Image (tube, helix red, strand yellow):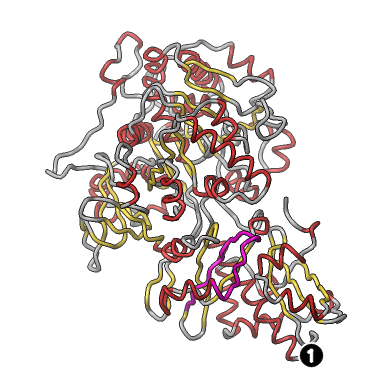
């Protein structure tokens, strides 16, 4: 047999890393008695040698699915179904795919990839929305050992950087390849449109079963997921087929998944959430339901789903509907709840306000809070189903215990791992193979553990409470403030829909605490009332400055990762821009550049920051002239030395000119109107006075 091509084997740096004692310790899970825990794969136990496919392989798993569950429906794909509106009937039925059909689809694509010269360690990019095709292509590539990178196309700049960062042998898209290549700066010859007849005919012509002369190594990476990057530069987590399938066992056990489940796949398939749950559900013969974007509640009711995994942003609008769309979705959610099929909704990929969880529990909706990350295949901690609702009420904000394949510890002040207590959360067992850049692995497995980057508390009963991210920690006068704790407190207020706490520079305390609060514009909530509410947090934790946003203002202004995790680092920059603008207006008034009595508010202007000026009487302001003179006042408003301020801005990828508002809107107010407006909060002022045409849909 010929030697493998150099591109088809593990790089030397990774081979060396995997040979170290620290790496081996970090990838070994042990039970409470110190015994090594190894996964038992059901398909490997029952596989036949007649196929010639190794039992412990991803291809072996695929073939077992087809044989084990054959005629059962694996997928109900509504992704290309059109709805005339919320609650309307779809124009066509969903595409139903049985397990035997899915196994054949996967293997035909695997065979086609081999005709393209692809094999182990060769990279492919999936630039596709959720659909049956994404799963089939992903599983086909894993079956032959290909290295897949799913890419979030909603973040165009980041997608372009990822696509240009390495050589992808094939890039799969759902649009015209030449236009895609021109826009993203890649070679059009490597771009494949999966919806063309040419592609469909090519894969259909391949055999429905595939054998491999040189099977890929089960423990080698087949997936690279770009970490969220909410606190810094994202890294590529390399995940193996063995790890993915071990993670699926953890989810099956932790959520008691069953063949009768109908799971609504809401989160995107470029994120570990949907990737991991899909594998786990297929492994028990369940039905995965793929909705079109924005119509998940319609599909949930129509397909009588029993389970799903969501983020808080999917649930808050049905509890506190604001827009007509929210109100229709709330009605659909009630129909789903009253239908009696829904067993539970898992929530993770970000914080879950205890108030939101409690309100859903009060309505009989079981919310299973979980914690996980790309680096542990999502097979980490979760609240288990099967207990009375009071059990969950007594453990609000708990993400539950870990599983047998993953050890979790917290580091004490001396850096020693402990089974319980509060500290940096570290893990070992079923974790990532490595990061895809050698330099990102320096210290990644120090002491035989992988540092999750989270601060957590593990209780005596083994429940894990996530306190926050270590990189997000605000250090005010030497004391650590965890933003997520402040978020959670703010979101307990009945008028607050969502909160995001950030740190900002302060000359007296080094850092100060600030917070965004998204509130309903109908809520009569003076900012002073919310300040009084957060005062209970004490002088260290309470936000010095609150910025109230309306739900409409927040849309397009805040930035989220694919599954809905708020990008706190980016919002820190937005907060600072708004803080400086707010403080600059009184300085401008004092110097006579704005009429006496003018009030100014930094507000969202699409994805940027605008400045709303409320001017008494018939006063006028020339926006262009004011904008040209703003820069020195913004510098004064920061209260920082010039060099220090510029360094902070540079770290956050902006400059002094970035502080300038993208638009200035001046509203002259008569005395009575000025008096009435003084009772409105920032969110209400935005809704009443900011130009309608400049708002994002």
Q: Can residue 219 be seen in this view?
A: no
Percent coordinates x, y for residue 647 in the rendering: 56, 75
**Residue sitting at the far top:** 50
Q: Which residue lies furthest to the left in this view?
A: 33
Q: Looking at the image, how many numbered discs can be counted on the residues? A: 1
Task: State the residue at coordinates (41%, 77%).
Answer: 538
Stretch of the chain drawn in magenta? 511-529
- The N terminus sits in image quarter: top left
In the picture, measured across the screen, residue 44 lies left or right of residue 188, that is left
Q: Position of residue 29 (x, y in %)?
A: 23, 42
Image point 60% across, 40% down: which residue?
329
Q: Which of 161 and 37 is in front in this view?
A: 37
Side of 245 where 73 appears, left or right: right
The quadrant holding residue 579 is bottom right
Q: Is residue 503 magenta?
A: no
Judging depth in this view, the residue of 587 and 524 nearest the camera is: 524
The residue tagged 1 is: 592
Picture coordinates of residue 604, whole percent (x, y): 69, 63
Residue 519 within the segment the image draws in magenta: yes
Q: In this view, does 6 lie to the left or right of 23?
A: right
Q: Nearer the viewer, residue 563 or 658?
A: 563
Horizontal and vertical percent for residue 248?
A: 36, 33
Element type at marker 1? loop
Instruction: Please name the residue shown 54% across and 31% down the image.
Output: 300
Indicate the quadrant where residue 283 lies: top left
């Amino acid at each position: 047999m010929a030697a493998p091509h150099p591109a088809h084997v593990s790089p030397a740096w990774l081979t060396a890393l995997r040979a170290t004692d620290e790496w081996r310790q970090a990838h070994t899970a042990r039970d409470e008695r110190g015994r090594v825990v190894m996964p038992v794969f059901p398909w490997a136990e029952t596989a036949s040698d007649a196929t010639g496919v190794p039992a412990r392989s991803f291809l072996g798993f695929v073939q077992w699915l087809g044989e084990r569950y054959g005629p059962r429906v694996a997928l109900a794909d509504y992704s290309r179904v059109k709805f005339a509106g919320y609650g309307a009937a779809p124009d066509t039925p969903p595409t139903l795919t049985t397990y035997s059909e899915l196994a054949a689809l996967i293997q035909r694509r695997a065979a086609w990839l081999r005709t393209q010269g692809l094999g182990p360690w060769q990279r492919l990019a999936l630039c596709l929305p959720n659909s049956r095709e994404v799963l089939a292509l992903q599983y086909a590539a894993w079956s032959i050992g290909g290295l897949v990178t799913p890419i979030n196309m909603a973040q165009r700049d980041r997608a372009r950087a990822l696509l240009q960062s390495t050589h992808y042998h094939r890039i799969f898209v759902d649009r015209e390849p030449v236009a895609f290549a021109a826009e993203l700066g890649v070679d059009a010859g490597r771009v494949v449109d999966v919806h063309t007849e040419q592609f469909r005919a090519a894969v259909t012509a391949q055999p429905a079963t595939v054998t491999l002369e040189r099977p890929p190594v089960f423990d080698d990476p087949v997936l690279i997921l770009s970490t969220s990057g909410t606190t810094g530069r994202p890294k590529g987590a390399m995940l193996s087929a063995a790890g993915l399938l071990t993670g699926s066992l953890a989810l099956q056990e932790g959520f008691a998944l069953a063949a009768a489940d109908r799971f609504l796949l809401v989160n995107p398939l470029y994120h570990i959430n949907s990737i991991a749950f899909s594998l786990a559900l297929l492994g028990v013969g369940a039905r995965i339901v793929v909705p079109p974007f924005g119509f998940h509640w319609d599909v949930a009711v129509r397909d009588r789903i029993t389970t799903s995994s969501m983020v808080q942003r999917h649930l808050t609008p049905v509890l506190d509907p604001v827009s007509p769309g929210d109100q229709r979705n709330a009605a659909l959610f009630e129909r789903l709840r009253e239908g009696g099929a829904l067993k539970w909704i898992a929530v993770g990929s970000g914080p879950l306000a205890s108030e939101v969880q409690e309100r859903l529990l009060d309505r009989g909706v079981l919310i299973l809070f979980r914690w996980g990350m790309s680096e542990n295949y999502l097979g980490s901690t979760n609240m288990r189903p099967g207990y009375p609702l009071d059990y969950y009420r007594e453990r609000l904000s708990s993400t539950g215990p870990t599983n047998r394949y993953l050890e979790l510890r917290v580091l004490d002040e001396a850096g020693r791992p402990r089974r319980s207590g509060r500290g940096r959360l570290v893990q070992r067992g079923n974790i990532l193979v490595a990061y895809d850049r050698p330099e990102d692995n320096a210290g990644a497995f120090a002491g035989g553990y992988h540092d999750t980057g989270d601060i957590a508390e593990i209780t005596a009963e083994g429940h894990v409470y996530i306190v926050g991210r270590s990189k997000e920690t605000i250090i005010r006068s030497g004391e650590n403030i965890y933003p997520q704790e402040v978020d959670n407190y703010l979101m307990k207020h009945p008028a607050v829909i969502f909160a995001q706490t950030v740190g900002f520079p302060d000359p007296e305390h080094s850092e100060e605490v600030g917070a965004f609060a998204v509130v309903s514009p109908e809520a009569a909530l003076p900012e002073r009332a919310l300040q009084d509410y957060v005062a209970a947090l004490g002088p260290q934790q309470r936000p010095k400055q609150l910025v109230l946003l309306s739900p409409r203002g927040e849309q397009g202004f805040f930035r989220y990762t694919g599954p809905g995790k708020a990008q706190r680092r980016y919002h820190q920059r937005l907060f600072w821009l708004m803080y400086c603008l707010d403080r600059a207006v009184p300085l401008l008034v004092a110097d006579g550049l704005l009429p006496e009595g003018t009030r100014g508010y930094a507000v969202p202007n699409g994805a940027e920051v605008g400045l709303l000026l409320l001017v008494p009487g018939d006063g006028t302001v020339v926006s262009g002239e004011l904008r040209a003179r703003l820069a020195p006042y913004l510098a004064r408003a920061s209260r920082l030395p010039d060099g220090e301020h510029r360094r902070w801005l540079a770290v956050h990828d902006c400059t002094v000119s970035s502080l300038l508002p993208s638009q200035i809107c001046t509203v002259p107010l008569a005395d009575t109107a000025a008096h009435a407006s003084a009772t409105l909060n920032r969110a209400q002022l935005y809704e009443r006075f900011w130009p309608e045409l400049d708002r994002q849909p």
